[in-house]
Amino acid sequence: MATFATFKRLKDKGVAALKQGDYVAAKPYLIQAAECMIELAEENKDAKQRAEQEAYAKELIELAKSCDRKARHGKRGRGVRDRAGEGEEGGPSAEDWIVKEKPNIHFSDIAGLEDVKEEIYLKMIYPFRHPELAQRYGIDVGGGMLLFGPPGTGKTMIAKAIACELDATMFVITPAQLMSKWVGEAEQNVRKLFDAAKAEDRSVIFMDEVEALVPKRRDQQSAVMQRVVPQILQELEGFDRKPGRALLFLGATNEPWQLDTAMMRPGRLDAKVYVPLPDAEARFKLFEIYLGKRPLADDVNFAKLVELTDGYSGADIKAIASRSATRPFLETVSGAQPRNINMADLLAVIAEMPPSVRKKDSEKYEQWAAGVG
Ligand SMILES: Nc1ncnc2c1ncn2[C@@H]1O[C@H](COP(=O)(O)OP(=O)(O)OP(=O)(O)O)[C@@H](O)[C@H]1O
Ligand SMILES: [Mg+2]
């Protein structure tokens, strides 16, 4: 169910990524925002407003399309280091940046990644559900885990599903939010975050773009970072483990090779989980999930779609599904007879949408995963 709040969140994320020159990240948000706006338009009874919303959705789609071109010609990186390097003007207040949520995403909503799910159950869910057994075998409840892999493969979804499965409160944060150019403030921010997390029985701290914690340059900013990482690890180690309580620290990154070895020591982010691009079976499931709720023509051939989308991420497939819907939708809006999404719509979208992860890059992840695995 689309809401204005969802639309705004998606659009804001897309625009923020655009501003950073991160077109790869911006695109799926813009597409999802457009899709959301189309849904809102469909529900809107006011014809004038509806027309405006449809025009806005169209604009967002054009903007998203331009991302492909820009990504090919310009920067591909996430711009994280730059942003972290700038720091926050004056430092954010606790209320501004500590965002709590109770996610409602289940492992069954995540296509494929069966090995990943199994590993997470073993390391995070079962020890929590069976504390006596875990204690007997000396298995810790809680701790840290690093999810790494290409963009749009479901890392954030997994983190949410873990929090949901444990009925935990999730705290979502990026290193940039902890940063401050004021002496001691980044450390204070870490403390505030962990205090808030420890105040709950079960918490999952999810730090996206965790590679930005690792200093790149030998300047003052780096010195702050060098204190922040050990502090996070200390906070984790200092957590009072009692039955029914848990504090998990999940880091996610698209650039695992940037990470500090100190983050990876046993008892820390020692559990490294590779979240790869979806295999054929997972892509089938993804098409089922994201096309399933839309009206489909008989000629839609899932096996063919799976074959054509080798190398595409979950987020890409979601985008293909929503973009294929905009064609018949816009035709209908302009007065044509309503029709179902057909194979030609899907093929046209796939033809103009290359995978967001380049083959060369996905091989890099495979190699890194093989090295640490
Ligand atoms: N395995 C999957 N099953 C279902 N949906 C998926 C899957 N992978 C990706 N998606 C879809 O793609 C969107 C992006 O996924 P998500 O945000 O979890 O990716 P990510 O790995 O965290 O990407 P990034 O590295 O860019 O943060 C999700 O909202 C979801 O709709
Ligand atoms: Mg993510």
Image (cartoon, grey):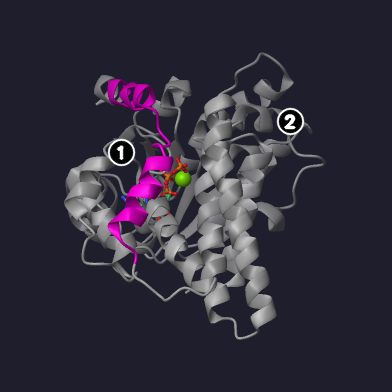
Q: Which residues are magenta?
A: 341-368
Seen in the picture, residue 226 relative to 236 is either above or below; the reply is above
State the quadrant of the C terminus: top left
User: Considering the numbered disc 1 on the image, is that residue within a helix, a strand or a loop?
Assistant: loop
Residue 224 position in % (x across, y down): 67, 27
Badge 1 vs badge 2, beta-carbon distance below 8 Å: no
Seen in the picture, residue 212 relative to 62 is either above or below; the reply is above
Q: Using a 10 Å C-alpha cutoff, classify the residue at mark 1 as few (fewer than 14 neighbours), some (14 to 19) or many (20 or more).
A: many
Residue at image location 25% in from the left, 44% down from the top = 116
Seen in the picture, residue 121 relative to 67 is either above or below; the reply is below
Q: Magenta stretch: dominant SS?
A: helix
Q: Quadrant of residue 126?
A: bottom left
Which amino acid, by three-letter code, is at mark 1? Leu
- Eye-nearest disc, 1 or 2: 1
Q: For mark 2, what is the residue?
A: 86
Q: Residue furthest right?
A: 90
Q: Earlier in the sequence, mark 1 or mark 2?
A: 2
Q: Is residue 365 magenta?
A: yes
Q: Is residue 199 magenta?
A: no
Residue at image location 38% in from the left, 48% down from the top = 348
Residue at image location 43% in from the left, 65% down from the top = 328
User: Considering the numbered disc 2 on the image, is that residue within a helix, a strand or a loop?
Assistant: helix
Q: For mark 1, what is the residue?
A: 277
Residue 106 position in % (x across, y down): 32, 63
Q: Quadrant of residue 313?
A: top left
Q: CA distance from mark 1 to mark 2?
A: 32 Å
Q: Is 141 situated left or right of 14 in this image? A: left
Q: Is 254 situated left or right of 129 in this image? A: right
Q: Is 107 situated left or right of 90 in this image? A: left
Residue 46 position in % (x across, y down): 65, 84
Residue 242 in sight here: no
